[in-house]
Image: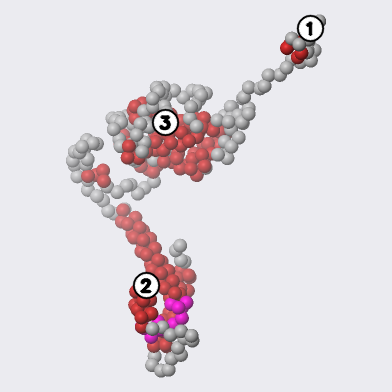
Amino acid sequence: MVMEEDQLDEVVEIARGLMDEEEVRARPGPQQPQKGFTMTDDDIKLLKAKHTFLNDFSDNFIRLTPIGDLMKIESTAMKARELERSREADDKLAANKAALLTTFTAVKEGKDNRQSVLHPARFMAGAACSSTRQWLAAREVLGTSSLPAVGSYDMTSAGLAGHVSAKGWAELHNMASGKLSIRMFSINSCGTRVSGKKTGDEEDPMDVGEFKLALRAMRTAFQLALPWNHSVLALEGFFHQNNFCSSDLANVEKRAFFLVKFTDYVLGQNADRWRDSEPFLTAGDLKAAWSSFFGSQPHASLKGQGQKKPQQGPRQGSQRQVDPRIALGTVPSG
């Protein structure tokens, strides 16, 4: 925890008071030894080895100062050092940020094939601006054309090998595509053909656990293929901030169905925004988008609704009531 300015002044004042006491005790003259205990030279040597800050004090001061006061001095010194380090870090970050406006890195020409030959510019520090600004800058450079799609990114290192279908890699590289679906990042869907059509009413095979894994796979795939595109990071951040909308979906029968449907909706909206040169939906935007989306769902049924109702017996008067003994053949029907 970083101390405030007034707290630092109080700590420094305490330290100065203790130092003044040291000077008084170090003056020649009769000293009052501590009652009941006299610290030997071996004790002082052991203390200095264990608490290195005591090396700055004389043996006489250590011998005459209560152990509790020595520990207070150590605590004060540690807090002062921690505050100093924190200030140094804050000052360094602020200075580096200010220098960005006047410091430019010359990017040399070279070759890059995304696999065996990597240009040194790939290892420059990340852009220290807003994610939406990167998105719009990329839109100006790339336009609406899709990038050459490959599926050889190292998903294995993240423990996600086989989670992205070929269709998913192809659609991911096309920023203007409205066919991208989170189902393309589910390992259970990779063995089957994913059409990419978003009917919105199809039966979704995912449960919430599978959805979370598919979301992680999609975020990792975007990070590897399009590191400047943080739209899926924003989507993942929204879900984590809101505990995957558990409060709204607490009484909903098929939670994953709505999570998948909303995710595909957001992917489509971001594709439209890319085509229109507009920023992607941030985590803050997605909170309002979810409220509007979920509230407009006509089939947001609660648990128990939509299930088959138990069959009721014939209404009285509509059919003749049959004695169960007759049905079993135990009594004659006459």
Residue, disc 1: 333
Query: What's the amino acid at mark 1?
Result: Ser
Task: Identify whether 266 is placed above or below 30.
Answer: above
Q: Quadrant of residue 107?
A: top left
In the displayed orientation, state which residue is furthest to the bottom.
29
What residue sits 48% from the left and 36% below the top? 209
Residue 63 lies in the magenta-colored region = yes
Which portion, as a residue range, is magenta?
Answer: 58-70
Q: Specify whether 307 is left or right of 236.
A: right
Which element type, helix, strand or loop, lies under badge 3?
loop
Q: Main secondary structure of the magenta part?
A: helix
**Residue 283: percent from left, percent from top:** 47, 42
Q: Is residue 201 visible?
A: yes
The one nearer the camera, 291 or 276, is 291
Q: Is residue 13 visible?
A: no
What residue sits 43% from the left and 36% below the top? 213
What residue sits 48% from the left and 70% below the top? 6
- Any mark on residue 132, and which? none
Q: Are marks 2 and 3 in contact (CB under 8 Å)?
A: no
What residue sits 46% from the left and 24% below the top? 198
- Any mark on residue 50, and which? 2
Which element type, helix, strand or loop, lies under badge 1?
loop
Give the crowd class for mark 1: few <14, some 14-19, many >=20 residues within 10 Å. few
- Measure the alpha-carbon separation of dots 2 and 3: 55 Å
Q: Quadrant of the N terminus?
A: bottom left
Tell me the mark number nearer the camera, choosing from 2 and 3: 2
- Measure the alpha-carbon separation of dots 3 and 1: 61 Å
**Residue 312: percent from left, percent from top:** 71, 19
